Image: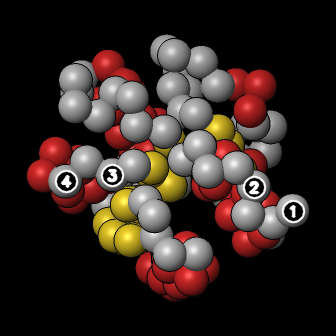
Amino acid sequence: MAYVLIVDDDEDFAQTTATVLRKEGHEVQIELDTQDAAESMENKPPDLVVLDVMFPEDASAGFELARFMRNESEQLKEIPILMLTAINAKFPLGFGPKDINSEWLPVTDFLEKPVDFDVLLDKVSKLLGEGSTTG
């Protein structure tokens, strides 16, 4: 299957998500901050990144990591990014797939927490080019 990197400061959520993805046969690595994630990706580029937005050190660190991947790293610029975040619960600004663009929100797809894991698996499968796993 694929190597998936989860970048999320909520360790419980990341572990649960990793368990779900591992049950589908994926190799999963968790990074709890964006700096460690950037280093991890440079050492071993993932097939997919599941990325949160808000981190304790910076409420928009996930946006910055996505921009780094797309605009500053030749090695990482083509990796699909699934933004998985609760930003709309904390800041009700209505972020969503309509906001995806190469400058401001350079991600491949967007899901909100709390997430239905069947929906997550379907998105992951599609982003990895595997088709649907849930139907």
Q: Give SS at disc 4.
A: loop
Q: How far across and how far down the image is residue 1, in percent? A: 45, 64
| Earlier-in-chain disc, 2 versus 3 | 3
Indicate which disc, 4 or 2, sits on the residue closer to the N terminus.
4
Residue 44 is tagged as 4
Q: Secondary structure at mark 3?
A: loop
Would you say the residues marked 2 and 3 are in contact, meaning their CB atoms lie under 8 Å apart? Answer: no
Sequence-earlier tag: 1 or 3:
3
Q: Which residue is mark 1?
A: 135
Residue lying furthest right? 135
Amino acid on which the number 3 mark rests in the picture: Pro
**Which image quarter: residue 67?**
top left
**Percent of width and height locating residue 66:** 41, 35
Give the residue pinned by disc 3. 46
Secondary structure found at label 2: loop
Cα distance between the residues tagged 1 and 2: 6 Å
| Point 54% across, 33% down: residue | 107
For image coordinates 49% across by 15% down, the residue present is 103
How packed mark 3 is, by other alpha carbons closer than 10 Å (few <14, some 14-19, many 20 or more), is many
Residue at label 2? 132
Instruction: Indicate which label's residue lies in the foreground, 2 or 3.
Output: 2
> Residue 82 has which mark?
none
Tag 4 near tag 1, CB within 8 Å? no
Crowdedness near tag 4: few (<14), some (14–19) or many (≥20) residues, C-alpha within 10 Å: few
82 and 95: which is toward the camera? 82
